[in-house]
Image (spheres, helix red, strand yellow):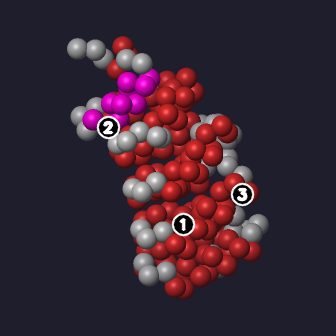
Amino acid sequence: MLGLADLSDERVVEALGSAPRTSSAYRHLLNRGPAAVPAIRAGLRHLDPVVREQCCKLLDHLLVEDAVDEMIAMLDDPVPSVRVAAVHALSCDRCKTDACRPAEALVLAPGLRLLRHDPDAHVRAMAVELVGRFVHTSVEAEAALMRARQADPSTAVRKKSGWYAPGGTIYRRT
């Protein structure tokens, strides 16, 4: 039987969809670093949502400028867990191993759309983090967080919005 090291990156991306191999395939691709990024980017178009989600999670650590538009497109994926992984990859600075940070001009509008209209509360809660990155520079971001804090149907989204909105703990810290 072939080990992951014997497989092409494309085949290892396929293995992300196999429950017994998901974590080892993920670690293998992460350890391959930038060399695996082309195969990971191709995996964003895979039929299996588990593969798409894992590829978003990998790009959270290995994001390159050329992949930002593809990650933004993942915000429209029909599967909520894929959208959650994509919005996290676009908003989280802690996970990045390089300097690729998506610009406000590219990600704020999709983040606002998710915060206002996504039917999944977990996706909206993650969108709070993306919109919250720009609360100090965008009146639109501030207004959206205030609106979500007051009117989102989910208590979790209202609570998290309060952290990022003016007066909130994360707002004050940043």
Please give the name of the residue rendered at 42% of the width and 43% of the height, measured from the top-left corner: 52
Q: Residues within 10 Å of mark 2 (few under 14, many from 20)?
A: many
Q: Which amino acid, by three-letter code, is at mark 3? A: Glu
Q: Residues within 10 Å of mark 1 (few under 14, many from 20)?
A: many
Q: Which amino acid, by three-letter code, is at mark 1? A: Leu
Range of the magenta residues? 9-18
Q: Is residue 121 above or below residue 107?
A: below
| Image coords of residue 16 (percent x, y) | 35, 35
**Pointer 2 residue:** 17
Q: Which amino acid, by three-letter code, is at mark 2? A: Gly
Report how far apart the C-alphas of labels 3 and 1 lie in the structure. 15 Å
Give 148 or 136, whichever is nearer the viewer: 148
Please give the name of the residue rendered at 38% of the width and 26% of the height, measured from the top-left corner: 12
Q: Secondary structure at mark 2?
A: loop
Q: Residues within 10 Å of mark 3 (few under 14, many from 20)?
A: some
Label 1 vs 2, first from the N-terminus: 2
**Pointer 3 residue:** 104
Question: Position of 6 compared to 159: left or right?
Answer: left
Residue 122's mark?
A: none
Q: Is residue 144 above or below residue 96?
A: below
| Image coords of residue 139 (percent x, y) | 74, 74
Spot the residue most to the right: 137
